[in-house]
Amino acid sequence: MDTVELLGNLGLTQQETQVYLSLLERGSLLVSHLGRDTGLHRPTVYTALSGLRKKNLVTVAPKGRQKFYHAESPEKLQFIFGTLKAEYEKLLPVLKAMHQHQGRRPMVRFWEGRNGMRGVLEDIQHTLKSGDTYYRYCSQQAIAAMGRHLVTDFQHWQTTNHIQRFVITDALADWQKTSNMNRSYKVVPAGSDLLRENILMAIYADKVAFGDAINETGVIIESPTFAAMQRKIFMTLYQQL
């Protein structure tokens, strides 16, 4: 960050910065000297000087009919910084309250086409950390269709990161019957149409995701409240099966 940008962040306009730096470098100057030194028009110089005086960064010393302007010590900038810091600390609780309120609003993302199901799978992979758990409804037909969209290392990622999975499905494939301490399945009764729509539904972290592998669409709803409710519904059904 250069000097001009830094002073701008402290509240000085570009013209105020030009005038202040000119006075720091050259000492006391008349308005006409400042105009030549900065290339600013006289009215602009006066406006900049007025702003600098209000910030206590410039003083004026009359000599006869002339007025010489003098830059105060740069240490005065510390006062401006301190004032901004104090204002920020007063404003911070308000900003945090706004952010928390926004966080309670569900955020929805949608994908379609080739990225439909893939967007859901990638988000699961990027959201969960080692040892985390997610919950999934998925029919075997949806699983088969989903295979076309799997992120290259998705299965390997689940295994190496010990991702815990609770799954409700309509049937088990041979590979799913193999014992796995990180994976638990419950199968809906034969003849049930609970998973007839062949939609993948996953509950993870503060998110609920829906993937339609047939129509290639994906939806993620991010909401702690919504996810908590869906997690309770899932576990209630899981325990009944």
Image (spheres, rainbow, N blue to C red):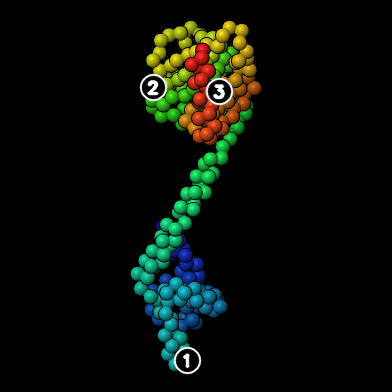
Above/below status of 203 relative to 45: above
Position in image of residue 141 (x %, y %): 58, 13
Quadrant in the picture for residue 102: top right
What residue would you read off at disc 1?
65
- The residues bearing labels 1 and 2 have C-alpha atoms spaced at a distance of 83 Å
Q: Of circles 1 and 2, which is in front? A: 2
Closer-to-camera residue (139/104):
104
What residue would you read off at disc 3?
201
- The residues bearing labels 1 and 3 have C-alpha atoms spaced at a distance of 82 Å
Label 1 crowd (10 A; few <14 / some 14-19 / many >=20): few
- Residue 72 vs residue 173: left or right? left
Q: Is there any visible trace of residue 56 in the rendered image?
A: yes
- Residue 61 vs residue 187: left or right? left
Label 2 crowd (10 A; few <14 / some 14-19 / many >=20): some
Closer-to-camera residue (12/92):
92
What residue would you read off at disc 2?
162
Closer-to-camera residue (71/51):
51
- The residues bearing labels 3 and 2 have C-alpha atoms spaced at a distance of 20 Å
Q: Residue placed at 58% from the left, 16% from the top? A: 142
Contact between marks 1 and 2 (CB within 8 A): the answer is: no
Q: Earlier in the sequence, mark 1 or mark 3?
A: 1
Looking at the rendered structure, the secondary structure element under dot 2 is loop
Amino acid found under the numbered disc labelled 3:
Met
Amino acid found under the numbered disc labelled 2:
His
Looking at the rendered structure, the secondary structure element under dot 1 is loop
Contact between marks 3 and 2 (CB within 8 A): the answer is: no
Quadrant in the picture for residue 144: top right
Q: Of circles 1 and 3, which is in front? A: 3
Above/below status of 226 relative to 71: above
Q: Earlier in the sequence, mark 3 or mark 2?
A: 2
Quarter the N terminus occupies? bottom left
